[in-house]
Image (spheres, rainbow, N blue to C red):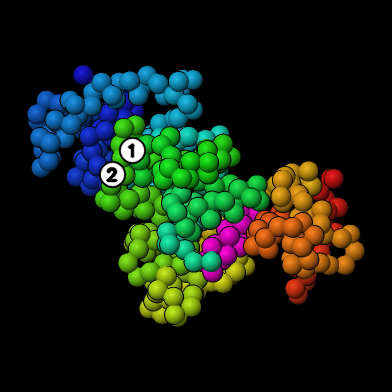
Amino acid sequence: MPTDETFSRLWLSFAVEPGDEAVGGRTHLVGASKVLAELLAGESPLKNAKAISARLKHFEEAANDLAAQLGTPGGEGVRFITPKDADWPTQLGALGAREPLGLFVCGQLEIKPTLNHSISIVGTRSATTYGKHVASELAGELASRGFTIISGAAFGIDCVAHHAALAVAGQTVAVMPAWVLDDYPPSNAALLQQIRKHGFAISELPIGTHPTRPRFLQRNRLIAALSRATLVIEAPWRSGALSTARQAQSLLRLVMATPGPTTSPMSDGCNRMIREREAELVTSAEEVIELLAQAGCDLAVRSQTPRRIDSLKGFDAAVFEAIPTKGGVSARDISLKLGSPINDVQAALGRVELLGFVIRRSQKWALNRDALKLANP
């Protein structure tokens, strides 16, 4: 009979759906080892005890195998942490009985320091060009100022926010709706690999689990609870992003939203939340930081090593080299010089601007000489 609290939570995670308040409440009261023992002995007071017990027995071998792999080379760097561990994000305690039994974590960063200075950025999967631009600007600027960007690695706004943070050598965290090493969605595999390498991915679901609609919704409660504030960028009235915002509201966390065109269905949710005073209107990183300060969040920015010019690679480096040492140049002129589509040039300029190496003056781009002095070329 298992008695170890950590293993008990791991085994229970195979059999209990995320956010199960009955199991969570019982675990808070008597501990996971006791809950597990009651279930296996058929003595649990839980209403769904019979179904959970059957799943526990079905997943016993899988739980033992996973426990043996964690922390070993074969475990691919995955850790399992619980509320008893020193690096547990204590802000999850605000979820009460819905607090996760544990978290599977894959990444190199320290968990608590990374999450203590963070903001969640979410939005529609069907993002417009406008929404992607806003998300990239805000996420990149906030990440460059030391904020960790938390999101769900989904299509649309989520992956734009992650990409923007990585582009400025910032920190970002993906909260997954399935096993932490699964690339979901599959087309975001390269992004998720970068997040695990430079930030970390987390999930409360063990190996062998698959995304379901209820698991997506429960994942949203973690995105909301892990940070001090949630920013919604583009969301229709019915969307998972608004579910995250409502979770944040229920936890009394700051909720912000960017306005969008009144003609765009993708902005209906944000515009309506702003109109009904459910979210604070923001249009820039400065406004986000101002609201965080008013909410009493710790705004001490972590020091960062100045980025080097040689950190620019590939097309970004080519675009940077096309900017004259004196004066400015338009994106169209760079496009003609390089023989590349102007949309690609504008995207590269945006990334280089987020790194601080260039600045925009009216319709032209110029070198940011103050930043270049610190870049150690």
Is 135 colored magenta in this rendering? yes
Task: Categorize mark 2 by other alpha carbons within 10 Å: few (<14), some (14-19), many (20+).
Answer: many
Q: Residue at x 12, y 41 (%)?
A: 48
CB atoms of marks 2 and 1 within 8 Å: yes
Hey, which quadrant is residue 138 in on the image?
Answer: bottom right
Hey, which quadrant is residue 12 in on the image?
Answer: top left
Q: Nearer the viewer, residue 257 or 254?
A: 257
**Spot occupied by residue 118 in the image (x, y as percentages of width and height):** 53, 52
The circle on residue 205 is 1
**Majority secondary structure in the magenta region:** helix
- 161 horizontally vs 306: left or right: left
Q: Is residue 20 above or below residue 334?
A: above
- 346 horizontally vs 116: left or right: right
Q: Residue at x 90, y 64 (%)?
A: 326
**Spot occupied by residue 87 in the image (x, y as percentages of width and height):** 47, 36
Q: Is residue 286 above or below residue 349?
A: below
Instruction: Please give the residue where the numbered disc 2 appears in the rendered image.
Output: 18
Give SS at disc 1: loop
Q: Residue at x 50, y 71 (%)?
A: 258
User: Which quadrant is home to the N terminus?
Assistant: top left
Looking at numbered disc 1 in the image, what kind of residue is underneath it?
Answer: Leu
Q: Residue at x 35, y 40 (%)?
A: 178
Sequence order check, earlier mark of 2 and 1 = 2
Task: Categorize mark 1 by other alpha carbons within 10 Å: few (<14), some (14-19), many (20+).
Answer: many
User: Which quadrant is home to the C terminus?
Assistant: top right
Residue range (magenta) = 130-146
Give SS at disc 2: loop
- 216 horizontally vs 159: left or right: left
